[in-house]
Image (spheres, helix red, strand yellow):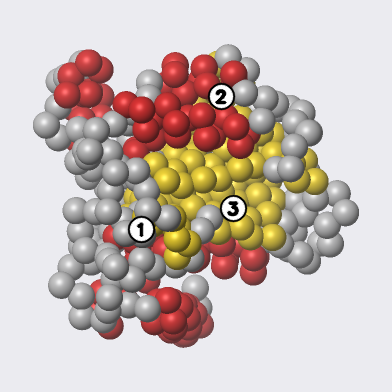
């Protein structure tokens, strides 16, 4: 496999960054995953962190070097994230369940598989054409699909930021699995949070991606353009951009040709927050200013405990 990939996240105007994103690849398979912790609920960044760690950990275990079923991998492990959040809510006696959106993709044998819950999006571009975009699980999208509001009204509707489906919470998520799509040389895949796409029209996103030959430059240009449109209430914004094939010659190019069959590589985007002195500081898991009752060690220990408990349950039930 040959592809070029870049990911980035910016805090925007928010006090904290609740977005989490990562990618992982084996010799013959690639995972992209992006989660937007829901700020209207406590500890959204915990849910987002659990999401990316659960999927990347499972990918590293199972992609040796192929997944048996990419579609089943996505639906099973996104559901597992929900189960883990509910377990966490109970064991830590949280006031409410942490929640997050999620969009995840697998590329294997030249085909793209995608699953999502919420309003974080995946775009599939081929040259100057948008071939596919996930449909948001939002109230305004539901109203538009039923013909009750126009596209113009969607942008100004009072419920434009409300979603009806996510990971975490009392209701089990409805995981939307897209039809698999064949990739060709030069196709571009973009995963992004609403902090980015909410500021730019699809045509603007396409124009910027086509303007830059390098995926890193294109991704950062998208973020620059989005940040120019926001006010003091601007959201976190995050994106992963992948171009399929070896069209690009850059530091972000990946070739798995010489990669051992049993090896995987995972890159989790570091989380940053603005310190009071104006400098940006890396916090690789949880922002201590937000979650003073969960340290990095606490969340990693809890993650391991939940995974062990789920494994025991599967062994007992024979799942």
**Residue 275 occupies which quadrant of the picture?**
bottom left
- Work out whether residue 79 can be spotted: no
- The label shown at residue 277 is 1
Where the N terminus falls, by quadrant?
top right
Q: CA distance from mark 1 to mark 2?
A: 34 Å
Q: Residue 130: x and y, percent?
A: 51, 20
SS assignment at label 3? strand
Q: Which residue is mark 3?
A: 23
SS assignment at label 1? loop
Q: Nearer the viewer, mark 1 or mark 3?
A: 1
Point 59% across, 53% down: residue: 23
Disc 2 or 3, which lies upstream in sequence? 3
The reply, left or right, for residue 148 in relation to residue 208 is left
Q: Is residue 51 above or below residue 131?
A: below
Point 69% across, 39% down: residue: 4
Disc 1 or 3, which lies upstream in sequence? 3
């Amino acid at each position: 496999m040959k592809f070029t990939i870049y990911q980035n996240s910016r805090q925007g105007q928010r006090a904290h960054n609740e977005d989490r994103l990562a990618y992982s690849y084996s010799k013959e398979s690639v995972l992209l995953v992006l989660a937007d912790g829901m700020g209207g609920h406590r500890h959204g960044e915990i849910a987002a962190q659990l999401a990316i760690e659960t999927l990347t950990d499972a990918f590293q275990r199972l992609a040796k070097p192929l997944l048996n079923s990419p579609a089943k991998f996505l639906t099973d492990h996104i559901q597992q994230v929900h189960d883990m959040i509910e377990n966490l809510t109970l064991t830590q006696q949280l006031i409410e369940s942490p929640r997050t959106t999620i969009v995840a993709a697998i590329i294997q044998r030249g085909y793209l598989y995608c699953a999502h819950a919420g309003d974080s999006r995946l775009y599939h571009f081929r040259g100057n054409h948008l071939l596919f975009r996930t449909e948001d699980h939002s109230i305004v999208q539901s109203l538009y699909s039923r013909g009750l509001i126009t596209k113009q009204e969607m942008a100004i509707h009072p419920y434009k930021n409300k979603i009806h489906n996510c990971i975490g919470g009392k209701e089990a998520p409805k995981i939307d699995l897209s039809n698999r799509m064949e990739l060709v040389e030069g196709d571009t895949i973009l995963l992004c949070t609403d902090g980015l796409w909410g500021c730019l029209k699809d045509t603007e996103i396409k124009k910027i991606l086509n303007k830059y030959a390098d995926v890193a430059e294109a991704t950062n240009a998208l973020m620059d353009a989005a940040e120019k449109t926001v006010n003091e209430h601007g959201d976190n914004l995050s994106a992963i951009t992948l171009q399929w094939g070896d069209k690009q010659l850059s530091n972000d190019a990946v070739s798995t040709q010489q990669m051992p069959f049993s090896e995987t590589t995972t890159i989790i985007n570091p989380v940053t927050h603005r310190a009071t002195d104006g400098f940006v500081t890396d916090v690789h898991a949880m922002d201590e200013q937000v979650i003073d009752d969960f340290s990095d060690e606490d969340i990693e220990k809890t993650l391991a405990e939940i995974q062990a408990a789920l494994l025991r349950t599967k062994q007992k039930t024979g799942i």
